[in-house]
Amino acid sequence: MVDESATTLSGEEIDALLERAAEVLEARHVVPETGRVGAGMLRAARARQAYHHLGDAPAALAGRPTMDLRLATGDGHLLVEHLGDAARPADDWIVRWRQEGPARNWGVDTVRLLPGNIGLLKLTSFYTYDLAVAALGAAMELIRHSAGLVLDLTGNGG
């Protein structure tokens, strides 16, 4: 376990974090092969002690594996983030993003019919199915008889 009040992580703590991240990535990435590649990269970095020198720099300790994972997997959505410690927690953007979901209609920005009976669906974000199902269902109901679909993902960060 990592002592959340510590400002410096030991090599052993960094190794434990890397292994846990590898396990989660391997088990839960939406593309299994990408998860395996990312997990392998993290385990190889752990074996080389590649991040041990960053134990006293939490932002760098998160940023470096993020960059390495994105390069190894080609998945620009992968992110390792330092959320602060017990004394000074950082802003958790994931919690804020979920809280803002209803006001953002769970990512459903625009739904309409274009000339020629073409449906337009603009999604500004991808929320989890359990959160977004009602908004997505309502949007799809409005365009379900269209002859085609334009799915607009401009500005969608994932």
Image (cartoon, grey):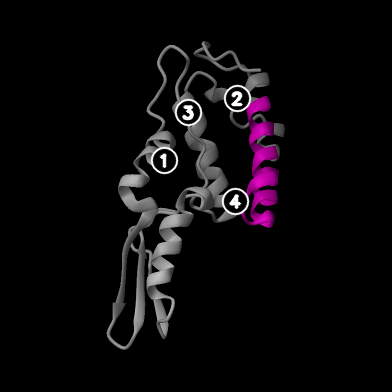
- Please tell me which of labels 1 and 3 falls first in the chain: 3
Query: Residue placed at 31% from the left, 78% from the top?
Result: 113
| Residue that mark 4 sits on | 72
| Residue that mark 1 sits on | 98
Looking at the image, is mark 1 or mark 3 nearer the viewer?
Answer: 1
Q: Indicate the amino acid at tag 2.
A: His
Work out whether residue 103 can be spotted. yes
Q: Indicate the amino acid at tag 4.
A: Ala
Q: Residue furthest bottom?
A: 116
For mark 2, does the 10 Å Cα neighbourhood hold few (<14), some (14 to 19), or many (20 or more) residues? some
Region rendered in magenta: 15-41
In the displayed structure image, the side of residue 94 where residue 129 appears, left or right: right
Query: Residue 82: which numbered mark, if any?
Result: 3
Closest to the observer, 121 or 65: 121
For mark 1, does the 10 Å Cα neighbourhood hold few (<14), some (14 to 19), or many (20 or more) residues? some
Q: Indicate the amino acid at tag 3.
A: His
